[in-house]
Amino acid sequence: MFEESPENAWELRFGTPPSALPNLEKFLNHRSVRKYTGEQVGEDIVRGLVGAAQSAATSSNLQLWSVVSVQEPARRQKIAELCGNQQQVKDAAWFFAFLVDHYRLAQAARAVGVTATGLAYTEIYTMAVVDVALAAERMVCAAESLGLGICYIGALRNDPYAVRALLELPEQTFGVFGLCLGWPY
């Protein structure tokens, strides 16, 4: 997939020869992949990758994040437009929107007759953003271990209200970043 060895990648980044790199090759060869082969990535693989994301560390076990797959062609085209018409958003086998999700916790609180007043605190917002990043990175590490390529899309935040409308998201949710996933070209 990449032309440099993990040892070369280490030397280029840090200016010294690596001392020992057991099983770190996938981490050292990480790249943002913007061109994909067009080959499909099976739903069974994606289910496993989402499971890996759900297994990431989470603050206070609150699970303050969600992920939405955007596969329907018209919606994918629109999300690409909202993300600055980045070609990889259109071409990747899968596109995911990673979200801060306070709605689910608010619903759970309502179900037991409690008001989730803490959701308005900056700390809860920070926990949610950290959790969504940890989950996505866990998914990325799992994907790359299978030879898949990824590209984070920060431009998902360009128009958060349009993204919320397009994805039909409930209140108290918003997109933090997108993630392209596919077989690297």
Image (cartoon, rainbow, N blue to C red):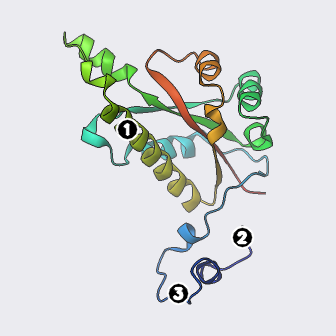
**Between marks 1 and 2, how big is the CA–CA gap?**
35 Å
**First in residue order: circle 2 vs circle 3:** 2
Q: How many marks?
A: 3
Mark 3 element type: loop
Looking at the image, is mark 2 or mark 3 nearer the viewer?
Answer: 3
Q: Residues within 10 Å of mark 1 (few under 14, many from 20)?
A: few
Question: Which badge, 1 or 2, is on the more N-terminal residue?
Answer: 2
* Whether residue 55 is situated above or below residue 106 in the rendered picture: below
Q: Nearer the viewer, residue 63 or 116?
A: 116
Observer-side mark, 3 or 1, equals: 1
Label 3, label 1: how many angstroms apart (C-alpha)?
A: 35 Å
At mark 2, the secondary structure is loop
Residue receiving disc 3:
18
Residue bearing the label numbered 1 = 126
Give the amino acid at mark 2: Phe
Residue at 56%, 68% in the rendered image: 26
Numbered disc 1: secondary structure: helix
Q: Nearer the viewer, residue 154 or 61?
A: 154
Asked if 170 appears above or below 139 in the picture, the reply is: above
Residue 125 drawn at (x, y percent): 38, 32
Quadrant where the image shows the C terminus: bottom right
Q: Position of residue 13 (x, y in %)?
A: 61, 76
Amino acid type, callout 3: Pro
Name the residue located 72 percent from the left edge and 67 percent from the top edge: 1
| Residue 2, numbered label | 2
Mark 2, Cα crowd under 10 Å, few <14 / some 14-19 / many 20+, is: few
Q: Position of residue 146 (x, y in %)?
A: 58, 59
